[in-house]
């Protein structure tokens, strides 16, 4: 194998430092960091899995590749994103155009795959039994290594005890490595890409449980070691899509603020209606948690999230059942929902990190005339820039027009106003809860700085920029790396030019081969994900409120 790319979701310097302090046994990962060149890897806006991994493997910003979040919106409706939403070619598709082959395992937003020279088993946002390339390869893998799952068998923290969850994580990690090595042996690829998602999921499902984190990282280290031994890559890159850490600030309910400012209209107010799924999912309240959990499990089986809650629950006749078991203290806060068609502006989804304007001619029931668009956008920016926490600190680090962050043919699908929380320590929520501020719904979430390491025969350590990086003794060499730089750097390790459409550049520790045009791709029509299992899993992890 010429080049191996190992994706470790949410890996970052603070987590690795904590693991070092616990004497975690991760010698392979530490060796790659210390013996090659490594450093912090700045993520993009927004720094979440479904958008960030496509940015990493295309080398482009979401305004070009077209994926901004876990959800894609068409008017006021939505679906979970998949590979047919992707507008830019992935690394393995670029390599295929140059006659090189690849094996790709567990990379998010790769379902359904297109044909290329090699093999691919999709990762997150794929269904549990995804279409793979070539057809039938997943059956072959399962026959050889046993069970292979995209998601763990438990559907959330309440569905499994600690030991069971950790065992599930470790099993997922093992199957990633075994599947990748099996396919690498069978296809003998020039390029390999294996991604480990459990390093992120453990923080969402076991917040603060560093022993569980340690178990996951030690399992990942074992698989990296065995993969290096089996594949003997000439060059190895390790990269994460973002970092992760504790949120010590506040939860800021953006739509509550916009309602007070006169932009958001609500529906189903008063003492009746269906509570939002997010607060219920987190078990907040004083009534019998077992009864509440059973009711919510019933609702979850039909894909109930606050994105769809009203219509689904009404059709199934579950409203009275749920209201009977929801703690009364939640009712008033949970019964109101944003009335998107009748609102002038709103946060559609917190992971988008921004505000959408209900523009006439663009949205199905747009009520903001185009002549008022810029004035409303300027007013929103000014209001949000002025928001302070109860402690008097700014909520946002940046509030800017979308064109400041996104550029490309898909930029028009982004939010109109981008809101970047200060130091990613303030948790944004799109739900209504009666008050602007509260404690973060999730105590751990994504941070902007991930990590990158490049090790191998083509790495020029003399070009290293420094000897040490952010709190991890003994590693360093890369300064100023960005998520978009990973794809062009991979191409350079294969002696191929950077694609001229890419936003990233080749890291200086690898010799660049200039730049060139690569063939465009045609993914055809978008297909719907429309998979309740995928939606429930993303909701359990807090990705869908």
Image: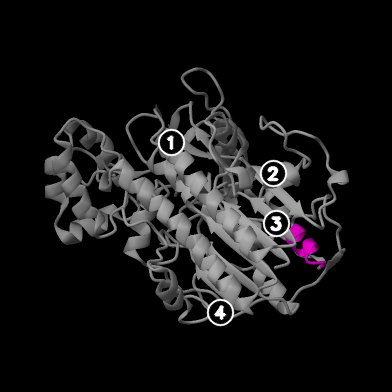
Between the C-alphas of marks 4 and 2, the distance is 40 Å
Residue in view at x 45 percent, y 81 percent: 136
User: Closer to the observer: label 4 or label 2?
Assistant: 2
Q: Which residue is mark 3?
A: 236
Whether residue 310 can be seen here:
yes
Residue in view at x 48 percent, y 31 percent: 247
Q: How many marks?
A: 4
Q: How far across and down, in percent of the image, does residue 309 sit?
A: 28, 53
Q: Count residues near mark 3 (Cα–Cα under 10 Å), then give few for <14, some for 14-19, many for 20+.
A: many
Colouring rule applied to residues: one colour
Whether residue 366 can be seen here:
no
Q: How far across and down, in percent of the image, does residue 7 sit?
A: 59, 54
Q: Which residue is mark 1?
A: 211
Sooner in the amino-acid sequence: mark 4 or mark 1: 1
User: Closer to the observer: label 4 or label 1?
Assistant: 1
Do labels 2 and 1 touch, CB within 8 Å? no
Asked which secondary structure carries label 2, the reply is: helix
- Please state, as top left, top right, bottom left or bottom right, where the N terminus lies in the image: bottom right
Q: Which residue is mark 4?
A: 524
Q: Count residues near mark 2 (Cα–Cα under 10 Å), then give few for <14, some for 14-19, many for 20+.
A: many
Residue in view at x 62 percent, y 46 percent: 29
Q: Count residues near mark 1 (Cα–Cα under 10 Å), then give few for <14, some for 14-19, many for 20+.
A: some
Mark number displayed over residue 33: 2
Between the C-alphas of marks 3 and 2, the distance is 11 Å
Between the C-alphas of marks 2 and 1, the distance is 22 Å
Asked which secondary structure carries label 4, the reply is: loop
Sooner in the amino-acid sequence: mark 2 or mark 1: 2
Q: Is residue 492 magenta?
A: yes
Q: What's the magenta region?
A: 488-495
Residue in view at x 74 percent, y 56 percent: 503
Asked which secondary structure carries label 1, the reply is: helix
Near-viewer residue (318 or 415): 318
């Amino acid at each position: 194998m010429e080049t191996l790319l190992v994706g470790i979701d949410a890996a970052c310097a603070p987590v690795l430092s904590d693991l070092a302090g616990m004497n975690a046994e991760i010698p392979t990962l530490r060796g790659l960091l210390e013996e090659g060149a490594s450093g912090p890897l700045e993520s993009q806006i927004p720094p979440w899995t479904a958008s960030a991994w496509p940015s990493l493997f295309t080398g482009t910003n979401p305004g070009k590749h077209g994926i901004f979040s876990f959800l894609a919106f068409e008017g006021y409706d939505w679906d979970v994103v998949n590979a047919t939403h992707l507008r830019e070619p992935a690394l393995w598709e670029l390599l295929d155009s140059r006659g090189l082959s690849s094996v790709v395992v567990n990379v998010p937003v790769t379902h359904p795959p297109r044909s290329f020279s090699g093999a691919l088993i999709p990762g997150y946002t794929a269904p549990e039994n995804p279409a793979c390339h070539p057809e039938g390869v997943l059956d072959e893998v399962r026959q050889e290594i046993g069970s292979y799952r995209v998601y763990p068998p438990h559907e959330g923290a309440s569905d499994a005890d600690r030991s069971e969850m950790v065992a599930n994580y470790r099993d997922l990690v093992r199957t990633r490595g075994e599947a990748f090595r099996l396919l690498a042996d069978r296809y003998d690829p020039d390029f390999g890409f294996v991604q480990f998602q459990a390093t992120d999921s453990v923080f969402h499902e076991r917040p603060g449980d560093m022993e569980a984190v340690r178990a996951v990282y030690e399992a990942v280290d074992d698989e990296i070691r065995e993969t290096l031994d089996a594949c003997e890559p000439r060059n190895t890159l390790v990269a994460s899509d973002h970092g992760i850490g504790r949120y010590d600030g506040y939860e800021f309910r953006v739509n509550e603020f916009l309602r007070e400012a006169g932009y958001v209209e609500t529906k189903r107010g008063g003492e009746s209606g269906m509570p939002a799924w997010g607060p219920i999912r987190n078990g907040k309240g004083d009534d019998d948690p077992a009864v509440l959990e059973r009711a919510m499990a019933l609702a979850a089986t039909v894909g109930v999230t606050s994105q769809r809650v009203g219509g689904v629950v009404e059709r199934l006749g579950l409203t009275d059942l749920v209201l009977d078991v929801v703690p009364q203290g939640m009712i008033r806060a949970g019964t109101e929902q944003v009335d998107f068609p009748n609102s002038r502006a709103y946060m559609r989804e917190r992971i988008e990190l921004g505000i959408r304007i209900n523009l006439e001619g663009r949205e199905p029931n747009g009520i903001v005339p185009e002549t008022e668009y810029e004035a409303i956008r300027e007013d929103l920016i000014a209001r949000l820039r002025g928001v302070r926490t109860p402690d008097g600190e700014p909520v946002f680090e940046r509030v800017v027009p979308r064109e400041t962050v996104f550029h490309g043919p898909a930029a028009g699908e982004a939010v109109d106003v981008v809101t970047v929380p200060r130091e990613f320590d303030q948790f944004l929520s799109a739900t209504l809860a009666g008050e602007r501020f509260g404690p973060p719904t999730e105590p751990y979430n994504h941070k902007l700085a991930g990590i990158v390491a490049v090790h191998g025969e083509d790495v020029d350590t003399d070009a290293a920029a420094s000897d040490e990086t952010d709190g991890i003794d003994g590693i360093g060499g890369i300064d100023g790396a960005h998520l978009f730089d990973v794809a062009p750097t991979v191409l350079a390790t294969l002696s191929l030019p950077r694609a001229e459409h890419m936003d990233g550049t080749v890291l200086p520790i690898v010799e660049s081969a200039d730049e060139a045009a690569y063939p465009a791709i045609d993914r055809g029509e978008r297909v719907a994900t429309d998979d309740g299992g995928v939606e429930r899993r993303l909701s359990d992890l807090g990705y869908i409120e």
